[in-house]
Amino acid sequence: MHTVGTFTFESIDDARTQYESVGPAAQTVVREVAKAMEFDREEYDERVTGDVVETARDALFATLLEVRVGSRGEFDDWCESYDGTVTTVGHENVDRVVWHAGPDGEAVAATFQTEEDAAVATLRRQAFGRLYRDRVDRS
């Protein structure tokens, strides 16, 4: 078993703090991408909306979530010691699992066979949507 990513939280307040902290980075990424795409000032003002920057912040936050990657047995062992609810997607007869435990006794997991990077990316999007989206953004 191994982990990828850096964000794991003890509380939803900790998650909210991290979510807010990636806002300036998201703004910079969007500005630099628009610059690379050679947006002039008018096009930038027209196309780079608050929703665009918010989407970048959501994606940046999600890509930094810590995800555990392991065998089915390692996942099952973890589940036995986890004091919370786990939502698992995928087929139960697949050999490998990725999972993320949120701060409020909820975790998400996805099974996969060979495409670890794709599984991790998918799980991070699911974790953000199921565990964080409605809890970290107060706008």
Image (spheres, rainbow, N blue to C red):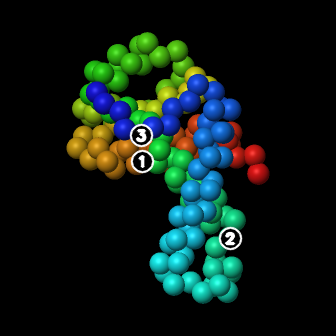
- Mark sitting on residue 122: 1
- Report x, y in % for residue 128: 55, 44
Quadrant holding the N terminus: top left
Residue type (three-letter) at the residue carrying disc 2: Thr
Give the spatial CA distance, label 3 vs label 1: 14 Å
Earlier in the chain: of badge 1 and badge 2, it is 2
Earlier in the chain: of badge 3 and badge 2, it is 3
Discs 1, 2 touching: Cβ within 8 Å: no
Residue type (three-letter) at the residue carrying disc 1: Thr
- Mark sitting on residue 49: 2
Tell me if mark 1 has few (under 14), some (14-19) or many (20+) residues whose alpha carbon lies within 10 angstroms of its own.
some
Viewer can see residue 50: yes
Q: Nearer the viewer, residue 118 or 31?
A: 31
- Report x, y in % for residue 79: 42, 19
User: Does residue 36 lie above or below 137 as drawn?
Assistant: below
- Mark sitting on residue 5: 3
User: Does residue 16 lie above or below 76 as drawn?
Assistant: below
Instruction: Examine the image and state in which quarter residue 75 appears.
Output: top left
At mark 1, the secondary structure is helix
